[in-house]
Amino acid sequence: MEEFPTGILLKKLEGIRMEDIPKYLDENRAGLRDDCKAFYYHMKNTIEKKGFFLKDVYLSAGVSESYGGKIITMEKHTKNRDLIIRLCLAGHFNLIETNRALKLYGMSELYPKISRDACIIVAINNHRFDRFKVDESLKNVGLRPLSETE
């Protein structure tokens, strides 16, 4: 499934007839914010595109496979933003992919004016995806590490 910027989606909608809506929704599911599966599709597609397996991402993020699966499919909902960030780090997401995941999950994107977020952004931009190294970097500058538990 391919994701499109809002402008492209608007252009596509100009030529859509009412009876074509199901096809449009199916073809653009990953890019639609109101779809409860958009987060799942984004995570799954991004992880697969990078050549990782979900079970390895869960392990690297420090969550069980069953719990991680429930979070990604949104069968269970978390308010723990750090958990979503850890999953993104484990999947080697770039900043755009990470912010999209956070946004689709209903959480605030990483914001450069927040010291802790700035540190995480730098880690992502420098391809430092090991959560323990990110925690160490955060601690070294007096910031709270990524949380370990739900």
Image (cartoon, rainbow, N blue to C red):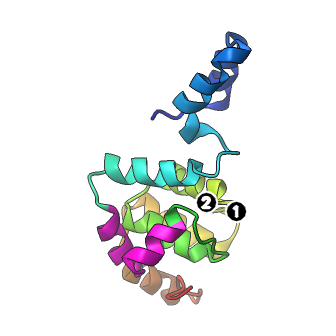
Using the rendered image of the protein, determine whether residue 57 is visible from the camera's viewpoint.
Answer: yes
Side of 10 where 41 appears, left or right:
left
- In magenta segment, residue 68: yes
- In magenta segment, residue 91: no
- Quadrant location of the C terminus? bottom right
Residue 4: percent from the left, percent from the top? Answer: 56, 30
Secondary structure found at label 1: loop
Compared with 16, 102 (above or below) is below
The residue located at (59%, 87%) in the rendering is 144
Q: Quadrant of residue 81?
A: bottom right
**Which one is in front, 146 or 26?**
26
Residue ranking furthest to the left? 51
Labelled pair 2, 1 in contact (Cβ < 8 Å): yes
The residue located at (57%, 23%) in the rendering is 23
Residue 92: percent from the left, percent from the top? Answer: 37, 60
Residue 129: percent from the left, percent from the top? Answer: 37, 68
The kind of residue on which mark 2 rests is Leu
As drawn, the label of residue 108 is 1
In this figure, which residue is indicated by the disc labeled 2?
102
Magenta stretch prevailing secondary structure: helix
As drawn, the label of residue 20 is none
**Which one is in front, 2 or 93?**
2
The residue located at (54%, 85%) in the rendering is 147
The stretch in magenta equals: 54-71
Compared with 19, 58 (above or below) is below
